[in-house]
Amino acid sequence: MHAYRSHTCADLNKSNVGDTVRLSGWVHRVRDHGGILFIDLRDHYGVTQVLADPDSPVFKEVEKVRSEYCIRIDGKVLARDESLVNAKLPTGEIEVFVQDMEVLGAAQELPLMVFGDQEYPEETRLRYRYLDLRREEMQKNMTLRSDVVASMRRRMWDKGFREYQTPIITASSPEGARDFLVPSRLHPGKFYALPQAPQLFKQLIMVSGFDKYFQIAPCFRDEDPRADRSPTDFYQLDLEMSFATQQDIFDTVQPVIQGIFEEFGGGKKVDTEWQQISYADSALWYGTDKPDLRNPIKMQVVSEHFAGSGFAIFAKLLEQDGTEIRAIPAPKGGSRKFCDRMNSFAQKEGLPGMGYIFWRDGDNGMEAAGPLAKNIGPERTEAIRQQLGLGVGDAAFFLGGKPEAFEKVAGRARTVIGDELGLTDTNRFAFAWIVDFPMYEKDEETGKIDFSHNPFSMPQNLDALDGDPLSVLGYQYDLACNGYELISGAIRNHKREVMFRVFEKAGYGKDEVLKRFSGLATAFQYGAPPHGGCAAGIDRIVMLLADEANIREVMMFPMNQRAEDLMMNAPSEPTNEQLRELSLRVIDAPKG
């Protein structure tokens, strides 16, 4: 017999009754029923109930084991009494009578319990992650992650892509976040960078003539943490194609991602018709560039109904350049109680409030109610109702000003309204390509023009580079799903002179471009093909599939909110010898 097991803890069933077997695993829990000890023995595959009574040769030893002891048992498979069968377990028809036992690894008092659903502080869970990972939910999440990655690889190979690895130690590049720098021992005073993405290398792979590339790529970004973002590293499905249009990329990616969600989505509906929505329309309709289309609410501009109206706040606001009034329809939200609740929401978001109108049955038929309705009168109110397609029992909320000042709050309000009124279909994965991103944005404080998205993208209209940079659109695109950005990509700029012009608009001269991106700029002199691609965030995809709200629930060994690894004590202080080898000196951070 094998040194540790003849079967896993999920293998045994009624056909094994009478067999002598060997199992190894962890003591999930121990129950004492009148001198008979029952142990739920757990391994990665499942749970088997084993038991020992005073007739067992090792009863005294079995009495000593506690939760999370790692043990090996030999025993005889018995059929459970029919009334004691556990239909929830594959092994629920049998139990194993213990005839021999060996403690493979004893366990001290546990800082967190593996059995049960107790809540523990995240710091405790991350410090003892190896115990946290033993829990059933975490085992499922990590298995799901592994299966998703394996399926991605198969699907990419089936589409004619080959997997190539790109360097982990490289040069710094502008990907929108801070680099992790690595000091060079052989070149004192110089630093490598961990790649924020394989961006430049995958483009060079296309220049090298490989046509289709993909990689399950680790990426490193020194970012502030969020619930849906790791502060240090993450993995993405990275791909690139030569001689490809934007639509080619979409047609290639959709079957892969749609197939993943159909395979692992737990039976939820997966949209098969993926809309293409411009960045401008997404901001207008949803207040975000990663809309949740499960919520059917679309915001609309209603400025014309308030211009010159009796509602002085909006009327005067509209006299200023660049301002507008937007409405958030709220089907079934037509009660004063709900309207007051949403007004309070806006105040918590830092706004003075949020105007509203709701429609109800009156003595003479349908009537509009609320302060706004009284101020603008029945004719304007009726025009708003008809534009928004609302009726009795419905409401609308209004925000005004310059869109960039209220758009995000409007988007959050739309989400809250959809959730609270039960409009959002939570049993669905809804996808949309967001397209036509602006190439540039202006810093409101400094007035400086900078890239708003990927700096290596191809502008849609090269002539636009001679005019207002804020009007230049790029062949850039994101895939949104249920309020999250899953994919970001672009058709790349493959022309050297256009590359110089694009960077010049953001304040980077030709010499600076050649200094920072000499490899790419030089390669473009030697017959670079048109190419494009994208990258899908694996951690975020698994988070959605696992129905988790925090990305750390689907990462094996994540950092905490302060970008610390409590289990491995990272980051740590270097030794003086290490600093001398690297020609570095640590300067104390300024106080205050």
Image (cartoon, rainbow, N blue to C red):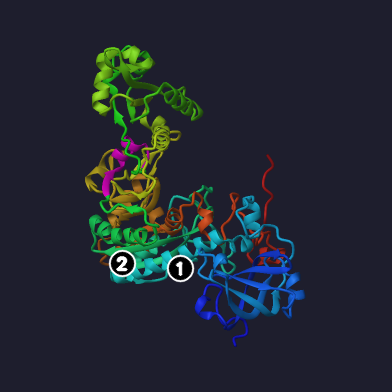
- At x 35%, y 21%, the residue is 357
Is the residue marked by circle 2 packed among few (<14), some (14-19), or many (20+) residues within 10 Å? many
- At x 36%, y 30%, the residue is 403
Residue type at mark 1?
A: Pro
**On the picture, is 193 further left or further right than 534?**
right
- At x 30%, y 52%, the residue is 271
Camera-nearest residue between 456 and 425: 425
**On the picture, is 265 further left or further right than 563?**
left
- Which residue corresponds to mark 2? 206
Mark 2 residue element: helix
Q: Is residue 309 above or below residue 356?
A: above
Label 1 or label 2, whichever comes before in sequence order = 1
Q: Which mark is residue 454?
A: none
**On the picture, is 103 further left or further right than 442?**
right
**On the picture, is 5 further left or further right than 294?**
right
Q: Quadrant of the N terminus?
A: bottom right
Measuring from the top left, give residue 471's x and y in whole percent.
28, 39
Q: Quadrant of residue 523?
A: bottom left
Work out whether residue 166 can be spotted: yes
Camera-nearest residue between 451 and 228: 228
Is the residue marked by circle 1 packed among few (<14), some (14-19), or many (20+) residues within 10 Å? few
Camera-nearest residue between 535 and 154: 154
CA distance separating discs 1 and 2: 16 Å
- Which residue corresponds to mark 1? 167
Please report the bounds of the magenta region as a residue range. Answer: 275-289
Measuring from the top left, give residue 164's x and y in whole percent.
38, 71
Mark 1 residue element: loop
Measuring from the top left, give residue 49's x and y in whole percent.
61, 70
Q: Is residue 420 magenta?
A: no
Measuring from the top left, give residue 401's x and y in whole percent.
37, 25
Q: Is residue 43 above or below residue 260?
A: below
Q: Quadrant of residue 251?
A: bottom left
